[in-house]
Amino acid sequence: TSDRTTTTAPATTTITTTTTTSSTLVPTTTTTTTTTHASTHTTPSHTHRSAQHTSRPRVYGGQLIAQALLAACLSLEGNAAGFVVHSMHSYFVSPGSFDVPLIYRVRILRDGRSFSVRRVKCTQAEEIVFVLQASFCRPSAGPEHWTQMPSATPPESLPDRLQIREAFAQDSRLSPRVRSSYARPEPERPLQQADFRWVVPIDTFFPKKRPGAQLLWFKARQLPECALSSSNFNACCLAYACDSVLMETVLAHHGLTWPFAGQKDLFVTSLDHCMWFHAPIRVDRWHLFETTSHVSGQGRAMCSVSCWDASSGRLVATILQEGVVRFPSGHHQHSLTNRL
């Protein structure tokens, strides 16, 4: 739908998010978009649908990244309409709640002939939850090179999410309570549409130290038709999915696991998230991630991902993230509980 309004104001886009349910990779949300330019203009109004992770204690970080980036993409108009995202930098400011709508406000910092820049602020009840800045460019020709994709076991021969759940349901090392929880059908949520397959699977409940780079495959199981031709929407899908695996490499380095799997004395959360998009992405194809944890200390850890399109061998994205990984104050030992 659309309406026409004449106004003079700073360039700002506002997107209001309310919770619904969806099976698509990027959570869909009922959103209202209003873009205001610094001169007399026509104001378009758009409605989109999205969903949150209702099974998590707080809003999933990948949702905030993807929806904020999508909000920035929706503000591209006129000369910038054909621009593609090439980089984004973001910070998680405070935990998001499921009880209050998410509001995304987009500030148009620049619209040039070759580059456009957007700043997005996500709030709940006027409290800042997340901020993102993204840069878009017009594709152009230039010299090309990229790091070669490492060799890896093909994804078709590796266990998928359902096979791993079936293995947990039959693992005699786990308690009957835990085994029965994996024997039941998993509640449907958007992240299930991200097909991750570790080349060397990580033992979630009985982890061993695995320093160094880790390899895993990724593709989207289900993708809306609009994403097949939209490079920016594919970038949003990648942003949504990748936040769920980056800190995994940090934990593997130290032989740790997630609190839900028994590591009750460990707190893990994302602090910031940066992405560079080097080439168009199609997340319905297999991509190889090489994840590396560069440093961990002072209650924080940093990790990176190099992402290759398996069909072309081209490096299509680089990702950096810093997160909190810490034990309670004064606690230097860790133990696994509630797994047996």
Image (spheres, rainbow, N blue to C red):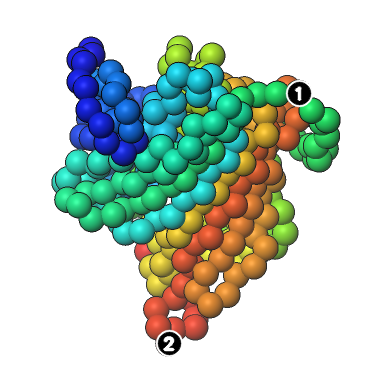
Residue that extends furthest to the bottom in the rendered view of this protein: 330
The image shows residue 178, relative to residue 40, as above or below, that is below
Q: How far from the left and from the top, in percent, is residue 161?
A: 50, 36
The image shows residue 3, relative to residue 93, as above or below, that is above
Are discs 2 and 1 less than 8 Å apart at CB? no
Which residue is at the front of the view, 242 or 111? Answer: 111
User: Under tag 1, what secondary structure?
Assistant: loop
* Amino acid at circle 2: Gly
Q: How far from the left and from the top, in percent, is residue 199?
A: 68, 41
**Crowd tier of the residue under label 1, counting other residues whose Cα lies within 10 Å: few below 14, some 14–19, many 20 or above:** few
- The residue at the point 45 percent across, 19 percent down is 78
* Residue 152 seen from this side: yes
Which residue is at the front of the view, 337 or 277? Answer: 277
The image shows residue 200, relative to residue 2, as above or below, that is below
The image shows residue 242, relative to residue 246, as above or below, that is above
**Crowd tier of the residue under label 2, counting other residues whose Cα lies within 10 Å: few below 14, some 14–19, many 20 or above:** few
Q: In which quarter of the view is residue 264 placed?
A: bottom left
Q: Which circle, 2 or 1, is nearer the viewer?
A: 1
Residue 335's tag is none
Which comes sooner in the sequence, label 2 or label 1?
1
- The residue at the point 31 percent across, 59 percent down is 94
Q: Which residue is mark 1?
A: 141
3D distance between C-alphas at marks 2 and 1: 55 Å
Q: How far from the left and from the top, in percent, is residue 272?
A: 48, 56
Residue 330's tag is 2
- The residue at the point 58 percent across, 27 percent down is 113
* Amino acid at circle 1: Ala
User: Which corner quadrant holds the C terminus?
Assistant: bottom left
User: Under tag 2, what secondary structure?
Assistant: loop
